Image: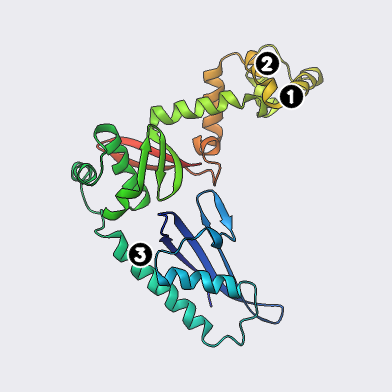
Amino acid sequence: MEKREVKFLDANHNLFTVEVEITQRNGYPELTMSGNYGSSCGQCLDAINPANEHQAKLVELWNKYHLENVSKVKNIKDTLNDVIKNIINAEEFRKGKPLTGFDDSSLIDIVEQFTDFEDEEARLCAALVQMFDLSENDLEHVEINETSVTVQGINYIAGNDEQMDEKTYEYIKDSAWAFNKGFIIDHSSVLDNDEGSEQILSAIQEQCEGGNEAVLKLIDDFEEFADDAISADGRGHFLNNYNGAEEEASINGVYYYACRN
């Protein structure tokens, strides 16, 4: 059985992505299953609160046969394929009307109709719909508190370009002590690329967060320091501790971004 992936919301409205595969290992067909939700991944089956019998069956099979020899389990491939098919069908029904194909203004109107979001929050929610391919019934599982956003149980930092820069600056300011020594030295007129400067930085960095203020005082222009860091690594490197990615979508000509955290 080739690797298959299935996504679904459980009864707690948390989005799970589960991978299922049967491979030939140790001389026999072995079932492997793993998943992720929120900031967790791997063997997260105990976190699933099944929303229907098909999700419950998937959890049952996971519990019973993961890393087991399934050569003598009757019709195991067909059973797994049927369970996945039924979960996909149930998920399509749950999601309701898709929100693809609407122009930005119409999409904002739909968001305002089905949620309590207005103005900037409605525009951000519309952008989240585009980023994560949300349907009508998914809107009830979106939470927005300024730049702290939750979509289907997954937390994000989200906002427009200015807001995302501000959040990244905050992160960099709080973690300046952890930056590469050479990068800090390049942004300091006090330090030189010599052994003495590196020893000074090493002593400060050994204090971890406690040495952060000292490092900031050594940096000539913090905004330039932060801009160069963002230019080199991207905002997702700092704001997304899951995979470093930054999602984006445009609403009425304004770009919005989201970083999983």
Give the camera-side residue of 36 and 1.
36
Residue 135 visible to the viewer:
no
Amino acid carrying label 3: it is Glu
Amino acid carrying label 2: it is Ala
The reply to whether the C-beta atoms of the residues labelled 1 and 2 are less than 8 Å apart is yes
Instruction: Place residue 31 in its image quadrant.
Output: bottom right
Instruction: Place residue 27 in its image quadrant.
Output: bottom right
Amino acid carrying label 1: it is Gln
Q: Secondary structure at mark 3?
A: helix
- The disc, 3 or 1, on the residue closer to the chain's N-terminal end is 3
The reply to whether the C-beta atoms of the residues labelled 3 and 1 are less than 8 Å apart is no
Q: Is residue 15 left or right of residue 216?
A: left
Real-space CA distance between mark 3 and mark 2, rounded to the nearest whole angstrom: 52 Å
**Residue 133 location (% of width, % of height):** 34, 53
- Around disc 2, counting alpha carbons within 10 Å, would you say few (fewer than 14), some (14 to 19), or many (20 or more)? some
Residue under label 2, please give it.
214
Residue drawn 52% across the image and 19% down it: 223
- The disc, 3 or 2, on the residue closer to the chain's N-terminal end is 3
Q: Secondary structure at mark 2?
A: helix
Q: Is residue 19 above or below residue 133?
A: below
Q: Is residue 259 left or right of residue 251?
A: right
Residue under label 1, please give it.
207
Real-space CA distance between mark 3 and mark 1, rounded to the nearest whole angstrom: 50 Å
User: Which of pointers 1 and 2 indicates the residue nearer the eye?
Assistant: 1
In the rendering, which numbered label is found on residue 91?
A: 3
**Residue 117 location (% of width, % of height):** 27, 38
Q: Is residue 100 left or right of residue 206?
A: left
Q: Secondary structure at mark 1?
A: loop
Residue drawn 36% across the image and 42% down it: 143
